[in-house]
Image: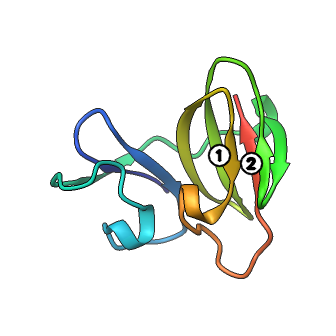
């Protein structure tokens, strides 16, 4: 399932199996000091239309603003970035602890 977490208009997304706690620990804090909620969204995207841009702790570089997925094995966190982003747990949170992760953008 894909879950959106945050206040209206500023979400962090994660694709996780089963249920998940709706907390900053799981998703990171999209907007500090603001009440947040979780929402179920459509099925996870097919990565056929995504471009692999970096391995964990690398840099995902691109021009313009793109959605970036970070994770592995069907467990991904998402964010929207302009001009690229570090591909790291510190930016996205850790969707798959103990597993090497990758970034993809579209």
Indicate the quadrant where residue 10 lies. Answer: top left
Residue 63 is situated, as x and y percent measured from the top left of the image, at 72, 19
Give the residue at x 83% y 48%.
54
Distance between the Cα atoms at labels 2 and 1?
6 Å
Vertical placement of 86 versus 48: above or below?
below
Specify whether 92 is left or right of 24: right
Specify whether 5 is left or right of 56: left
Farthest residue toward the top? 64
**Can residue 57 be seen in the rendering of this structure?**
yes
In the picture, the quarter occupied by the C terminus is: top right
Q: Secondary structure at mark 1?
A: strand
Packing grade of label 1 (10 A; few <14, some 14-19, many >=20) is many
Specify whether 8 is left or right of 68: left
Indicate the quadrant where residue 49 lies. Answer: top right
Front residue (pair 41, 68): 68
Vertical placement of 104 versus 74: above or below?
above
Q: Secondary structure at mark 2?
A: strand
User: For mark 2, what is the residue?
Assistant: 103
- The colour scheme is rainbow
* Lower position in the chain sequence, tag 2 or tag 1: 1
Front residue (pair 89, 95): 89
Front residue (pair 25, 106): 25
Residue 46 is situated, as x and y percent measured from the top left of the image, at 71, 39
User: For mark 1, what is the residue?
Assistant: 69
Residue 1 is situated, as x and y percent measured from the top left of the image, at 49, 56
Vertical placement of 43 versus 28: above or below?
above
Vertical placement of 96 versus 60: above or below?
below
Specify whether 79 is left or right of 20: right
Q: Are marks 2 and 1 in contact (CB under 8 Å)?
A: yes
Residue 25 is situated, as x and y percent measured from the top left of the image, at 39, 73
Tally the marks.
2
């Amino acid at each position: 399932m894909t879950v959106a977490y945050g206040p209206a208009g500023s979400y962090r997304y994660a694709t996780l199996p089963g249920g998940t706690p709706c907390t900053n620990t799981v998703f990171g804090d999209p907007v500090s000091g603001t009440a947040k909620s979780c929402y179920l969204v459509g099925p996870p995207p097919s990565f056929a239309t995504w471009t692999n841009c970096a391995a964990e702790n690398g840099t995902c570089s691109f021009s313009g603003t793109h959605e970036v997925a970070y994770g592995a094995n069907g467990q991904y966190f998402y964010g929207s970035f302009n001009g690229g982003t570090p591909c790291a747990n510190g930016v996205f949170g850790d969707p798959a602890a103990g597993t090497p992760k990758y970034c993809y953008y579209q």
